[in-house]
Image (cartoon, coloured by chain):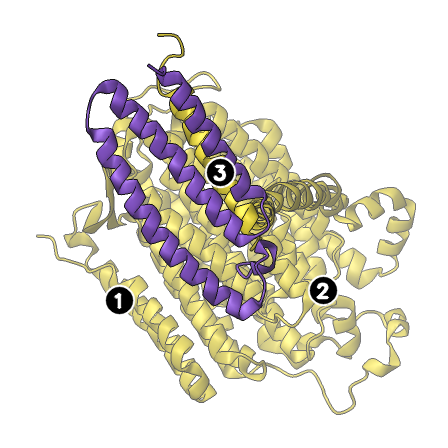
Amino acid sequence: MTTNLHLWIIPGLCFLGFLLNLLGGRHWSQRTAAVVGVSFVAAAFGYALWVVSQWSSLAHPYLEVHRPWMQAGALSIPFGFQLDQLSLVMLLIVTGVGLLIHIYSVGYMSHEGGFYRFFSLLNVFMFFMLTLVLANNYLLMFIGWEGVGFASYMLIGFFFHKDSASRAGMKAFVVNRIGDFGFLIGLFFIFSRFHTFTFTELFAQVRQMPVEASWGGPLTIIALLLFVGATGKSAQIPLYVWLPDAMEGPTPVSALIHAATMVTAGVYMVCRSAAIYDRAPHALSVVLAIGALTALLAASIGLLQRDIKKVLAYSTVSQLGYMFMACGAAMYGAGVFHLMTHAFFKGLLFLGAGSVIHAMNGEQDMWAIRAGAPGGLRKYAPITFITFLIATCAISGIPFFSGFYSKDKILYDVLTSPNGSTLWWGVGTLAALMTSFYMFRALFVTFFEGPQQTKRHNRPEEHHGAHHPHESPKVMTVPLMILGVLALIGGYIGIGDRFEHFLDPIFDTGVPPLASHPIAGGEWTVSAISVSVALLGLLIAWAFYLKNPEAPEKLAESMSGLYTLIFNKYWVDELYGAVITRPLAAFSRVVLWRGVDVHVIDAAVNGVASGASGAGNGLRRQASGQIRSYASWIVLGAAAVLLYMYFGGRPLLQ
Amino acid sequence: MVPLAYYLALSAILFCLGVAGFIFKQDIITVFISIELMLNGVNLAFVAFSHTLRQIDGNIFVFFVMVVAAAEAAVGLAIIIAVVRNRNTLDVDQMGVLKD
């Protein structure tokens, strides 16, 4: 007995909210725009819950195919939705966390301009993201993929009067596009080989293929190209550079798009393509390597950032690296588990940061925040502090918080699974140490008062006599609390691998698993190492930022070269600018614009025009008005005709 | 008998003299006379062929040409009178109003 779920309603509701706010928002009060924006997402979430309740009565995977979108010869692409375990998890995350962030935004954006525009953009983002996760074929997923990139661009550049925000939006979109280019080539390869994009048909064909041993096999090439798209969307090396700049957007945008949902699209796509990746071990090793290196690189940059949102941005890049590490070890379930817990604690971290920024009237530098809240911000905004603390413990992998279970599982899988390796486990553990350190650093600096010496950094004009830091309104703190609970208990669903077993049918791709390398002491040893690393990070952060505040400066002076390198983010942006952006722009300007467009195309068009005009000028002299010249022309013409008749019409010699 | 070639040569000479006069003469009446000369040269050629080939068609065509020449002379002279009344000159070069 299969009920018709009408899955299209879920994205459709969000699209409707988008349209209403877009067209009518400027006529309504802020309150109405908020109600419209939130209620449609709430309805989508409610519908998603109803769908979940129908789960046991469905065929798995549940497919809902509507009219074909494109049909050309062998190519037939339907508007189709698929509900299986993986898309169910993503659906709940997107609608649930999305709803909480929409509610939060009502409070956060209430003083900013463009209120209704914000909600319509958030709704359109939800529409595209839901299309992405519910699609049953690669092309429909790609629509969602591109659409969330568009929504991200619009939302990063939301404060478009600010030059830096517009540029950040463009940067995000362009870097994304580079990844999408690889993704598209991968799609072309898929179609040329398998003649279908639909997941069920495609993976049925892929299952017939063996595991590939070489780098040049078709599945390996496809897997690598798809991964290029994932590096763009999910901010991995080399295409992560847009994510820190994306912090120009409003904080709820950072929470929703750049922490909980859009950036996880790459992970979702890789997990969805598990059948392909399982048969391409070289591609998996690339995924693992890049994930691990990104985790380490981003964590190292996060050590020295002063802006609270930038710390969280690099932290997101780093945690996404962990998810890809899990995928690279062919333990996709662990990656999805971390995706879920990350959505909770990173969303909470960003919303908490927004609450802090709101409390401190727009200040984002952590030391300025500390200076502006005498006695420690935690006294003024206790709910924000507690939830931020919970999230920090979660992300650092402190036991019994959600992040511990997911991160620990990933590290264990990387160490023991046949596609994993000890080296990357070491890298991941080092990154975990850094993560714990910089997150607690952020917590301590933002919420705790510094020792008396830091008072000398107070700039006198920053003393707000009339404006004291305050806790955020309930519409903002209630989502914080809900996410706090989820960040606390969200990991328990994964105990005993229950969560991963739920997802097993998706990742059972027909590749017999190789033997994993067991570890002496098993999972407990690895966990012990992870926990001690997390606590070590906490301790060092406490030592540096609460107990002994001049220690960081002394350490920085003693390792000034390394400090400068990391503080400047390894000059990656500058490198890209010098090697790629500026030469490309110069090439466009000099060769393509000046050389081709002006001198060739314009010259050709103008040349035709001037040729016609010149010919006209020449011929004009014939019509002189002089009768005798007309007479001469007549005679010449007649002579020419005669000559032709005599010489041209027949052979000269009879 | 006079060979055909002589007649044709004379016809060609008449025609060429007519063309030369048509192009090079400044007086409009003289241009018209040259046109008549061209027509008569052609008439001579037609008659010569008609006599040589012992067919009547050439002579018939000469009638046509003469009729056309007469009509054209009448109309042309009427136009000249109109133009001369306006411009008070017989100079061809003074009559260029078709200039762009």
**Residues marked 1 and 3, same chain:** no
Return the residue nearer the eye: A240 or B1.
B1
Q: Is label 3 in a helix, a strand or a loop?
A: helix
Looking at the rendered image, the quarter that the C terminus of chain A falls into is top left
Mark 1 = which residue? A47
Q: Relative to A232, does residue A654 appear above or below in the rendering? A: above
Subunit of label 2: A
Dot in front, 1 or 3: 3
Subunit of label 1: A
Spatial CA distance of label 3 from label 2 is: 115 Å
Query: Where residue A645 appears, x then y in whole percent?
Result: 38, 24
**Residues marked 3 and 2, same chain:** no
Query: Where residue A621 appears, x then y in whole percent?
Result: 59, 49
Badge 3 amino acid: Gly
Mark 2 = which residue? A444
State which quadrant residue A96 falls in.
bottom left
Query: Where residue A261 appears, x then y in whole percent?
Result: 46, 56
Q: Is label 2 in a helix, a strand or a loop?
A: helix
Mark 3 = which residue? B18
At horizontal 61% and vertical 38% (from top left) the residue drawn is A428
